[in-house]
């Protein structure tokens, strides 16, 4: 099969940041009739950002002034291999109008799954649907009823992704607790993630698995289906490089600031966080001593969002 076709992709949100622009491929194009995010092939020796400006200018009549890299995706079709270089457009000028006869429309993120998208674009949808605030359970709970009560309150208050990180034994009682919590999560459209091993996905009704950093190196390729969310905790370059190799969906980088839960851990600070986040080709959450007040600071330093444990009670109560 030929070498990968390098494609730049632009994610454009509306003014309220709750809808994203999608484009329908014309019948004369390869895989015509499918929806995708706007963009096109990168020319030889062309920088991705300049390709983004050129493609969105040609397709939509806009001049992109600022954009940030979101993720890189490799995907193999039966007849070709592509590498998608995905960017989020931060600022543009001009009136957004279809220039090449393609149908375009604005759609809410949670409705993207209902469209007939190119396979390579489906991973982008999963990434876009990751919220900026990521909740993690306290690990001091003595029984699942305490977890259930607190988590149920978080879900009903608007938390959209929640990780179970518990020291409880994963027995039948634990399984029943996860089942109950999964029902509550689905009622509120919340993604439920289990901190554990990849094989846990076969036993527990969750939306994904989060791997501890020591678990990462037990795998040589992505250990669970792309139908599920796969995250990991990373603290250094080697762990991030391995997470990239495993095609992880997101990572935590920690600890950013000092924490009461890990007082002996040395915080890396925002400068080191920023440098580490540049190595990732997927969304990064900042973790460690953070509250909702740190969200904008985290995003300025390359984060997709922040993960919180104790501060969740202040935000979702």
Image: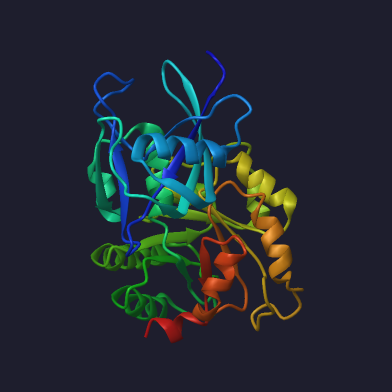
Q: Work out whether residue 18 can be spotted.
A: yes
Question: Which of the two residues, 271 or 143, is positioned nearer the viewer here?
Answer: 271
- Quick check: 248 left or right of 216? left
In the rendered image of this protein, does residue 271 appear above or below residue 309? Answer: above
In the rendered image of this protein, does residue 185 appear above or below residue 260? Answer: above
Residue 125 drawn at (x, y percent): 37, 47
Tell me how many marks there are: 0
Query: Quarter-wise, where is residue 160 in the image?
Result: bottom left
Query: Quarter-wise, where is residue 77 in the image?
Result: top left
- For the C terminus, give its image quadrant: bottom left
Question: Which of the two residues, 177 or 235, is positioned nearer the viewer here?
Answer: 235
Question: Which of the two residues, 232 or 23, is positioned nearer the viewer here?
Answer: 23
Instruction: Report the colour scheme.
Output: rainbow
In the rendered image of this protein, does residue 160 appear above or below residue 292? Answer: above
In the rendered image of this protein, does residue 59 appear above or below residue 160? Answer: above
Q: Please give the name of the residue rendered at 28% of the width and 43% of the height, measured from the top-left corner.
A: 97
Residue 120 drawn at (x, y percent): 41, 34
Residue 44 drawn at (x, y percent): 60, 24
Q: Work out whether residue 141 can be spotted.
A: no
Question: Which of the two residues, 167 or 22, is positioned nearer the viewer here?
Answer: 22
- Quick check: 51 left or right of 204? right
- Quick check: 198 left or right of 185? right
Q: Please give the name of the residue rendered at 49% of the width and 78% of the height, measured from the top-left corner.
A: 292
Residue 265 drawn at (x, y percent): 74, 74
């Amino acid at each position: 099969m030929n070498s990968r076709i390098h494609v730049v992709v632009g994610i454009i949100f509306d003014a309220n940041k709750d809808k994203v622009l999608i484009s329908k491929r014309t019948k004369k194009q390869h895989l015509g009739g499918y929806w995708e995010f706007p963009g096109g092939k990168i020319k030889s020796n062309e920088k991705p950002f300049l390709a983004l400006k050129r493609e969105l200018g040609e397709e939509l009549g806009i001049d992109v002034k600022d954009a940030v890299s979101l993720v890189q995706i490799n995907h193999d079709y039966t007849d070709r291999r592509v590498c998608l270089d995905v960017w989020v457009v931060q600022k543009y000028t001009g009136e957004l109008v279809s220039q090449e006869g393609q149908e375009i429309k604005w759609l809410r993120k949670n409705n993207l799954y209902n469209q007939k998208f190119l396979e390579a674009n489906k991973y982008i949808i999963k990434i876009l649907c990751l919220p900026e605030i990521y909740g993690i359970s306290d690990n001091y709970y003595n029984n699942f009823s305490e977890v259930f009560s607190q988590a149920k309150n978080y879900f009903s208050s608007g938390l959209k992704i929640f990780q179970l990180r518990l020291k409880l034994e994963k027995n039948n009682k634990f399984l029943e607790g996860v089942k109950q919590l999964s029902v509550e999560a689905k009622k509120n459209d919340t993604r439920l993630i289990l901190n554990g091993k990849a094989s846990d996905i076969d036993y527990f009704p969750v939306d994904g698995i989060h791997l501890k950093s020591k678990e990462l190196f037990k795998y040589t390729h992505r250990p669970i289906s792309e139908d599920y969310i796969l995250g990991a905790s990373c603290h250094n370059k080697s762990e991030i490089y391995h997470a990239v190799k495993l095609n992880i969906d997101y990572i935590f980088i920690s600890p950013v600031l000092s924490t009461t839960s890990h007082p002996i851990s040395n915080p890396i600070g925002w400068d080191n966080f920023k440098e580490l986040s540049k190595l990732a080709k997927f969304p990064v959450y900042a973790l460690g001593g953070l509250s909702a007040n740190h969200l904008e600071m985290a995003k300025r330093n390359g984060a997709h969002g922040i993960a919180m444990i104790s501060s969740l009670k202040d935000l979702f109560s």
